[in-house]
Amino acid sequence: MKPLLILLLGAGSLLAQNATRVTPTTLDESEVRITYGELKRLVAATLPKEASPEAKPKPPVQAALLSSIYRLNARSRSIIAELHVGSFDNGWHLIPIAGAEVGAVAIDPKDARIVASDNHLCLITDKAGSQSVKLTFPLAREDQATTLGLPPSPVASLEVMELPDGTVLRLQHGSATQLIANAGTIPLPAGGGAVTLSLEDARRAAQPPAGGITDDAVLSNASYTTQVVRDGSVLTEGSMIIRHDHPVRLVLQFPEAAKLLQCHVNGDPVRPTLGEANRLEIPLDDPTTDGSESEVRISFTATLAPLQVAEGELDLALPKTPLFAKQIDWNVQMPASYDLAFTGNVDPITDKTATPGLHLRKALCRDQQPQARITYRKRASN
């Protein structure tokens, strides 16, 4: 064992004497062996980083109706809407393509995903690029109106095919009216809105009022009741008697915050045309005899600030009409715990004490809106 230890010690001493001393010079001449993958990573780390490509900005409009062409065929009593839409990305979109005032009776292609939303017919799509859809709408019978709610479209037109002899097409948008007697193309408003179409007898449509100075219609009388509750909810119900000798359109300018609830003409429900600035147009059919009358019943709602506990003021108004009105009666009702007073362009009625509330009247007026500022005060307890 002792000779072996002596041998090992001698070998170690010999190796120590022959080992190369490590210096900066010897280090530069040394070799390092690494894998190719490790070398690739080291080289990549020394290269300048490439700027990452910028994300493509989103288009200002993701999808839209690009053009709408309505073709009216009086003989088949149909309106075919040829609609082109564009989607500028691959996301899902709900694109309004037509109003929901009238339901379509046919869709092409049949598998087009059309739904009704927010009073419009809308195309649901996740396909980028342009698509075409055709909708067929029924055209109302003669002297009845068809209303189309047009979404905004940069290209919009109505193509009228041959009209039957002695027939004209009345096109109404807002306060503008056109009588179309021949086939042709008529531009439609690019901003959209309600457009009303009706086929009429050419002689009757062109006939001016008798003598050229009389009104088409007169508002014989109207009666409204407005109810206001503590949370500020308002309900107004009204009945009007319109005297007219031929078909007319009753125009009503509603208060700004009002929303139509129901409308009936001679007991039958109707859907008025809604135009800009809360303007409604209600068609009144040809009366059976000259000097006949039509009864129009409407109701509308509004929301005001909640009533104050002690006292406060609120502003109320009725619809305005360009017709000459002989008499408009107005009953304003509020919670019984308040005493009421008013100012405005209406007069008080003192002979109707049986019904609670304020009794007001606007008489012999034209194109005026009955308005009242109501002051209410908590009634002192006895």
Image (spheres, rainbow, N blue to C red):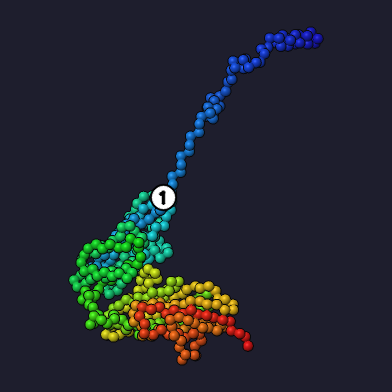
Residue 271 seen anywhere in this rendered image of the structure: no
Above or below for 108 versus 349: above
Image quadrant occupied by the N terminus: top right
Which residue is at a point 59% across and 84% down the rendered structure image? 379
x%, y% of residue 118? 42, 64
Q: Nearer the viewer, residue 323 or 356?
A: 323
x%, y% of residue 172? 30, 69
Circle 1: is it few (<14), some (14-19), or many (20+) Cα within 10 Å? Answer: few
Q: In terms of image quadrants, where is residue 121?
A: bottom left
Above or below for 283 versus 67: below
Residue 200 seen anywhere in this rendered image of the structure: yes
x%, y% of residue 74? 24, 68
- Which residue bears the numbered disc 1? 59
Above or below for 331 versus 186: below
Task: Indicate the secondary structure of the residue bearing disc 1.
Answer: loop
Q: Nearer the viewer, residue 171 or 75?
A: 171
Q: In terms of image quadrants, where is residue 98?
A: bottom left
x%, y% of residue 120? 39, 63
The amino acid beneath tag 1 is Pro
